[in-house]
Amino acid sequence: MIQPETIIFKAVPLVISVIALCVSFYSVMRALVFSDLSFKRLNRFDLNKTLLDIDAKLVDYPEIWAIFDYHPLSKTKSSEPLTKARREGYIYLCFGLFDGVFDYYENLIKKKSIDEQCWQAWKRSISQFFECSQEARTIWSETRTQEIYPTSFISFVNNLVSEIEKNLAPDTSQK
């Protein structure tokens, strides 16, 4: 006959093991959630820091402001090769950042509410960049530019630019 004490002595390690397994599982799940949150925050910070680094070029080389159609310097754009190269380089820096932002929000993460809000803000920024810069739209339209980016990003920007150009076109239906 089995003694009740024997059953208890055999059950106690099993119960402790099950409890330890549950605590371990809970700890792993919390660590994964925290890791995901930390990863997203770090990447959002890095994207914003990159934007600030790129925008610092506008302070270092004010003639780059000429790429923006609304800026007073756009009326006196220099055709000097070095100045044109700076403007084009700045535009390509922005394209590279926008490609990274697009990839991050559209391909790398599963978006939660805050991520969706950040992505919408970035899309507005990207749209404003293209809307305010005919020079950027012109450089973007070149084959040599588009062939260095992924097709999904090309489609995204082409759709934005197409919508912008449709909205910027004069309305001839009123005549």
Image: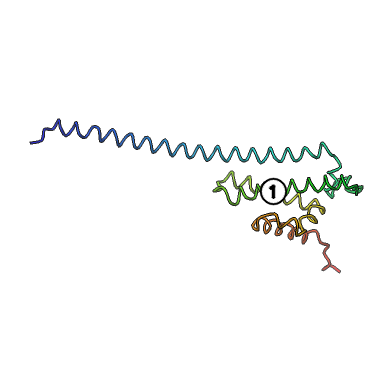
**Is 116 placed above or below 154 here?**
above
Observer-nearest residue: 144 or 16? 144
Q: Secondary structure at mark 1?
A: helix
Give the farthest residue toward the right: 76
Residue beneath label 1, please? 98
Observer-nearest residue: 113 or 145? 145
Location of the C terminus (image quadrant): bottom right
Amino acid on which the number 1 mark rests in the picture:
Phe
Determine which quarter of the picture holds residue 14: top left
Q: What colouring does the structure picture have?
A: rainbow
Expressed as whole percent of the image width and height from the top left, the position of residue 23 reads 37, 35
Give the farthest residue toward the left: 1
| Residue drawn at point x = 84 percent, y = 67 percent | 172
Expressed as whole percent of the image width and height from the top left, the position of residue 42 reads 60, 37
Q: How many C-alpha atoms fall within 10 Å of the one at disc 1: few (<14), some, or many (≥20)?
A: many
| Residue drawn at point x = 73 percent, y = 52 percent | 127
Determine which quarter of the picture holds residue 7: top left
